[in-house]
Image: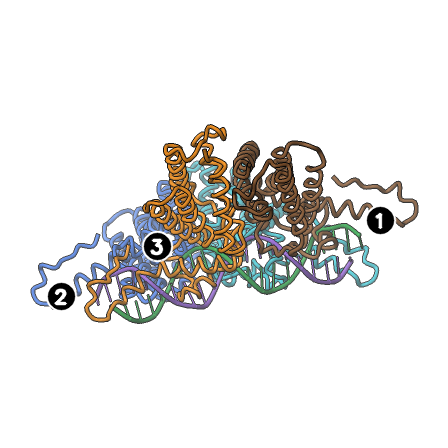
Chain colours: A brown, B orange, C blue, D cyan, E green, F purple
Amino acid sequence: MAVKQRMAAPKGDMPKQASSDKRETIIDAAFDLFRHYGYRRTSMEDIARAAGVAKGTLYLYFASKEELFEAIARMLAARMLKAIQEAIACDQPLEEQFLGVMDAKLGAVWRWIYSSPHAAELLDPQHQLPDDVFEEVDATFRSIIAKLIQKGVDSGELDLHAAGFTVESAAATLTTAAYGAEKAADEAEFRKTLANIVRITLRGLRA
Amino acid sequence: MAVKQRMAAPKGDMPKQASSDKRETIIDAAFDLFRHYGYRRTSMEDIARAAGVAKGTLYLYFASKEELFEAIARMLAARMLKAIQEAIACDQPLEEQFLGVMDAKLGAVWRWIYSSPHAAELLDPQHQLPDDVFEEVDATFRSIIAKLIQKGVDSGELDLHAAGFTVESAAATLTTAAYGAEKAADEAEFRKTLANIVRITLRGLRA
Amino acid sequence: MAVKQRMAAPKGDMPKQASSDKRETIIDAAFDLFRHYGYRRTSMEDIARAAGVAKGTLYLYFASKEELFEAIARMLAARMLKAIQEAIACDQPLEEQFLGVMDAKLGAVWRWIYSSPHAAELLDPQHQLPDDVFEEVDATFRSIIAKLIQKGVDSGELDLHAAGFTVESAAATLTTAAYGAEKAADEAEFRKTLANIVRITLRGLRA
Amino acid sequence: MAVKQRMAAPKGDMPKQASSDKRETIIDAAFDLFRHYGYRRTSMEDIARAAGVAKGTLYLYFASKEELFEAIARMLAARMLKAIQEAIACDQPLEEQFLGVMDAKLGAVWRWIYSSPHAAELLDPQHQLPDDVFEEVDATFRSIIAKLIQKGVDSGELDLHAAGFTVESAAATLTTAAYGAEKAADEAEFRKTLANIVRITLRGLRA
DNA sequence: CATGAATGAGGCTTCATTCAT
DNA sequence: GATGAATGAAGCCTCATTCAT
């Protein structure tokens, strides 16, 4: 997975590249094992073997098993943020945009976490994730959802007043309802359920 | 196994009580510790101490740590089933009944599981719960939701056709959306979120 | 297994009988289990169940698991002693008598101990058998063998002098050689091997 | 696995030695303890302490207590095989050769196993030794005994026909009779008893 | 930087023995 | 005498982490 590059290093001044590679190699290997076997059942020994390095090497890049886990979480958060922001780039009908943003976030989580038989363990807050790891992701997500709702209100498509919601409470409710889709057993069901939830809730807010 | 005898105790001699309830004492202690510290971090030693018995005593009632965990799950399932069935006993407007049933199930889960910082671990399928432990609960729950929707359709309050749903898909969607409420941070938020989700989705199905 | 006899006890003065029965019931059950599963793998729980009594009852008859084991050994020693003494009662040719005595002792040991897959454990001196338990058996055995050899010398059938033996050393050697037969895998092999050893060693002492 | 390097150590720096021999150090320590205290009463903790390593280290070399035991057995089997093969190298009278081969095998067993007060436990088939561990040893032993008998027959020294034996049955009988010597209480007695058995049985087969 | 042998605390489970009833 | 629930010491094994090379 990690490609060694000895040739192109003229002096001795560029070990960052290889190092960075090794760091990612480890993260990838660990994430893969965590998803397949869970946090507990994946030993540092396993990770080292899968990454093709010695056990001690892991501790050169991560202070502990827990910190390695956190690094994975941070990587996932970054990917989700990017996906969410890309989802509103294209111009589409309101419902499609809702669906797109939600799939960008929830779908990513689903594919990375919930599709694993050990989803629960991976989400256990025992792994004291620094509070801010997913905070930015959530904030961005909710603000975009709120913006879309506002857009619907402005265009007259939605009528929060009739339903007794504010933009904020509507955004919170839609978001939360959508979370339920993560219970899905497979990706097809996930997509269908998410679409149904978006459709039914938007109907509830329609003018 | 041990028969409870509260009535026929003439004097104050009911030492049988403690012995009979030992199994429950252990379950309670274990559940408490699991919620507070998670499955992994709760040792059999801890449970024994909390239950006020010796370590070996635990094994008189449960063959292993895992089996003790399963006993807890079974107890919770039984309580939920009872709560769900009680929730439809009283006559109320449709939305209230939806809310009642959902709170009976999801609220129970929330209070028992998700309110714990270790909810995730407690739900980890690693603990291979016999497939049928929560099956009856889920089946009952979904069938009652479906019945309520049918009732709404019959009374003309709901119009699935306009929304493009069948009774089944509507029931599934409502149920799933409601699951999202379990993400709530505290019980007040849980109740409010659940109410919002029920309101907004029912509106989406209104005639 | 143990028959209760409540009727025939006129007063209250004869509990020795029943007690003694229970003691033997326990010994029988324990011996059976020890032979089948070995000392370690047989728990006091198992013995109690097999004997049809409660665990605590075992301790009314035997101070410890070890003492129960010793009681079994003592019982076996007594049976062997009886068998050995019976073996010389009948009049027969010298070789037959040798064979008879040896089979009485070694055969008994073989059937009771070595035929068990856990023979080794049952003979582990960890079970500190009081030194005298099998002492009398051995003494009787050797003295009878010595007597038979003397008889052979007196009748001119054996010639120890030519072979360079005394009665004692000859008795010891025959006895020891015969012990080897206990390596046999089944009783048929045991008998054949024992017969061969007796035949060949007696030939070695013939005039 | 680890290569020993005694020669090329210029200074006094041979720490490699200790590391390389750790496996053997553990085996030696464990064998010693097993002989003195038996398998059961020797804990992994004890072995680690005796070998001067940590408990976990034992598991770097042996997967379980049982496997450590098997490694000891294998080592003993190898040593016995070597001793047996060396015993027929030198040219000697028939009886001396018998004695030599038997002492090589039985004497080794006696010194290693039966001299321990826990011989029995060490031989308990509970420790499911792979069937072939001592198979080669036994096969070699018996085949050599048979060869020696054949040699005696060829030279006219032995006369199996008169005694009613074949080479095979004679070999089996001698071998088995010799096993009895292992009952000896100390090494002097063992040697004397073995010599007596060999002498008397060979006399039984003489022409 | 990299290695991997070594560590040892900690966890689950068993079972001989006790004792209140 | 008889019971069996309760005890708790002791045992085997795992694995995150360290450190000398």
Q: In x, y percent, where is residue A155? A: 64, 36
Q: Which mark is residue B197?
A: none
Mark 1 closeness class: few <14, some 14–19, many ≥20 residues within 10 Å: few
Q: Which mark is residue C149?
A: 3
The residue labelled by disc 1 is: A15
The residue labelled by disc 2 is: C14
The residue under label 3 is which amino acid type?
Answer: Ile
Answer left or right for C97 relative to A176. left
In the image, are marks 3 and 2 on the same chain?
yes
The residue under label 1 is which amino acid type?
Answer: Pro
Answer left or right for C147 relative to A149. left
User: Disc 3 is attached to a residue of which chain?
Assistant: C
Query: Is residue D135 placed above or below C10 in the rendered structure?
Result: above
**In the structure shown, which secondary structural element does the residue marked by tag 1 occupy?**
helix
Q: Residue furthest left?
A: C10
Q: Nearer the viewer, residue A107 or C137?
A: A107
Query: Is residue B39 placed above or below D149 in the rendered structure?
Result: below
User: Disc 1 is attached to a residue of which chain?
Assistant: A
Can you tell which of label 3 and label 2 is closer to the viewer? 2
Answer left or right for D163 relative to A88. left
In primary-sequence order, the first of circles 3 and 2 is 2
**In the structure shown, which secondary structural element does the residue marked by tag 3 occupy?**
helix
Q: In x, y percent, where is residue A23? A: 74, 48
Q: How far is mark 3 from mark 2, CA to CA? A: 49 Å
